[in-house]
Image: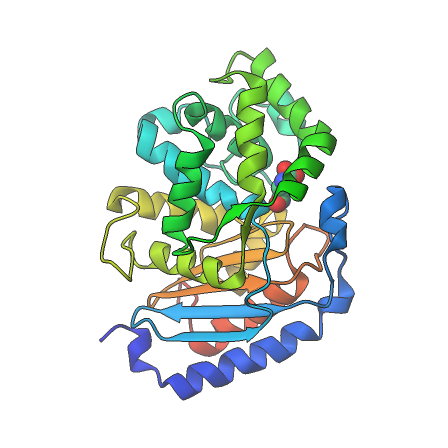
Amino acid sequence: MTETGNKSFDRIRAVFEEAYRIGLGYTDQGKVADYIPELAKANRDDFGISMIDGDLRTLSLGDCEKRFSMQSVSKVILLCAALLHCGFEETFSHVMMEPSGDSFNSILKLDLASNRPYNPMINAGAIETASLISGDLSFGDLLGYARELCADPEICLDEAVYASESKTGDRNRAIVYLLKSKGVLMDEPERTLDLYFRMCSLSVNARSLANLGLVIANGGLDPFTGRRLIPTEHVRTLKVIMFTCGMYDYSGKFSVRVGVPSKSGVGGGLVCAAKGPMGIGLYGPSLDAFGNSKAAVKAMEHISRELELHSFY
Ligand code: GLN
């Protein structure tokens, strides 16, 4: 019997239903991202929470089937792929593991303080991570890995988001060329950036993110097949980096208030790998000033408090 298995499912359901209700009350308090024009088409009232636990019990509330682009949640997959392909030492000789305290697309510290981006969960770090693998792995390889991690064979490239971001991603272009100018980019800039943009444009739903959260929470094992998708030695690294850096410059507050390894994206997605194990995927495109889903953050505060999911007690 797993840890969450000891909690009555009625109790879990009641907590999630209340969290959903709380989250809905916040959707009108944020804004959908519009710096990638295609993302501005999202409906800011949408909200969904999906949960799956180690006994494969599931819950779906609200807009759980609706597809949206993964955006920065894909940084988790890029990091897993880089760790698998290059190993721990090589990966972290190119990117640090420190919270940056700056916004996700900041270029400041990269230029002033370091040749290595602060961590793989911000744009500069994920672009560097992409450059470690883009010469050897194709987008098809990464897509296959994403489908496995999310137990979702329907994940595909959202062509409209990909085109929109490729066209307007000047800040990311600045980052990739700054990395190149420092001599630290490991592949050709346009190929690196293309992989980064494609990964951001993967089309998922809250259910796919719940499955991803469960694989991470489950120590890297696919709960459906028992297959190992992430090596044990990488799972702790991943969880700690999600915990300390996954919510951009809101990571500290989120860790105090929620305390669950998580990663958000400006498409409105949030993946949480909670103890139990329990995977939680949320979708709410109305964002706060940090680029995190307003409703999802509020819902997770409630869920973590009521089900005692905080990593530290
Ligand atoms: N594709 C987005 C960007 O590069 C991802 C950022 C995010 O989700 N925070 O700007």
Residue 124 horizontal/vertical position (percent): 58, 30
- Quadrant of the frame with the N terminus: bottom left
- Quadrant of the frame with the C terminus: bottom left
| Color theme of the render | rainbow
Residue 102 horizontal/vertical position (percent): 64, 39
Q: Is residue 297 left or right of residue 217?
A: right
Kindly identify the residue that appears in the image at 25 percent across and 58 percent down. 225
Residue 13 horizontal/vertical position (percent): 46, 83
Residue 58 drawn above or below residue 269: below
Kindly identify the residue that appears in the image at 42 percent across and 26 percent down. 133
Q: Quadrant of ligand 1?
A: top right
Residue 145 drawn above or below residue 92: below
Is 48 in front, or is 273?
Answer: 48
Residue 26 drawn above or below residue 122: below
Number of numbered markers: 0
Residue 194 drawn above or below residue 235: above
Is 89 in front, or is 209?
Answer: 209
> Can the viewer see residue 4 in this picture?
yes
Examine the image and state in which quarter residue 90 appears: top left
Is 291 in front, or is 146?
Answer: 146
> Can the viewer see residue 102 in this picture?
no
Kindly identify the residue that appears in the image at 56 percent across and 36 percent down. 198
Q: Is residue 298 left or right of residue 93?
A: right
